[in-house]
């Protein structure tokens, strides 16, 4: 029987409560958050919307994210500009590069959480009509 999807992501943090609150506040990610306003919130579960997800190991010497980190998060977003405005207003540094964007793949930006973990924000291209 095949795997149906991600069931969770667990990682270590120096201050798990503060880091979890940061994700809920700035990205609406984590227990109690829902992507669909009609969904019922659950304090332990983040209710996401279905869609594409990349699962890709990178070479050990990749420079795509920090060498001292084993992972980088990538969140699919629906309105990158609005999210970036909100993050800027909260004083969160944002990295964008024109060569990251591709009309066939989407637009990208990168931020870091308070513990230095890279977070890639990805706005996929609008579906073709």
Image (cartoon, rainbow, N blue to C red):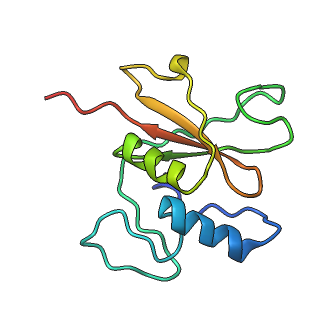
Res 7 seen here: no
Residue found at x 43% / y 30%: 107
Quarter of the image with the C terminus in it: top left
Residue found at x 44% / y 71%: 33
Q: Residue furthest top?
A: 99
114 to the left or right of 47 = right
Which x, y percent locates residue 49? 35, 57
61 to the left or right of 110 = right
- Residue 104: image quadrant is top left
Which x, y percent locates residue 18? 70, 73
Q: Is residue 41 above or below residue 86?
A: below
- Residue 23: image quadrant is bottom right
Which x, y percent locates residue 36? 30, 65
Res 98 seen here: yes
Question: How many numbered callouts?
Answer: 0
- Give the camera-side residue of 79 and 8: 79
Residue found at x 47% / y 64%: 28
- Residue 69: image quadrant is top right
Which x, y percent locates residue 17? 70, 77
Q: Residue furthest left?
A: 129
Q: Is residue 114 above or below residue 39?
A: above
Q: Residue furthest right?
A: 68
């Amino acid at each position: 029987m095949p795997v149906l999807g991600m069931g969770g992501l667990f990682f270590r943090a120096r201050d798990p409560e503060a880091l979890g609150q940061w994700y809920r506040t700035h990205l609406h990610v984590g227990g109690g958050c829902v992507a669909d306003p009609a969904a019922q919130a659950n304090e332990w579960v983040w209710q996401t919307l279905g869609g594409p997800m990349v699962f890709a190991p990178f070479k050990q010497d990749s420079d795509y994210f920090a060498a001292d980190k084993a992972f980088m998060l990538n969140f699919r977003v629906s309105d990158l500009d609005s999210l970036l405005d909100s993050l800027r207003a909260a004083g969160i540094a944002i990295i964008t590069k024109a060569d990251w964007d591709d009309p066939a793949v989407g637009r990208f930006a990168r931020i870091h959480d308070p513990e230095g973990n890279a977070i890639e924000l990805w706005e996929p291209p609008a579906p073709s009509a």
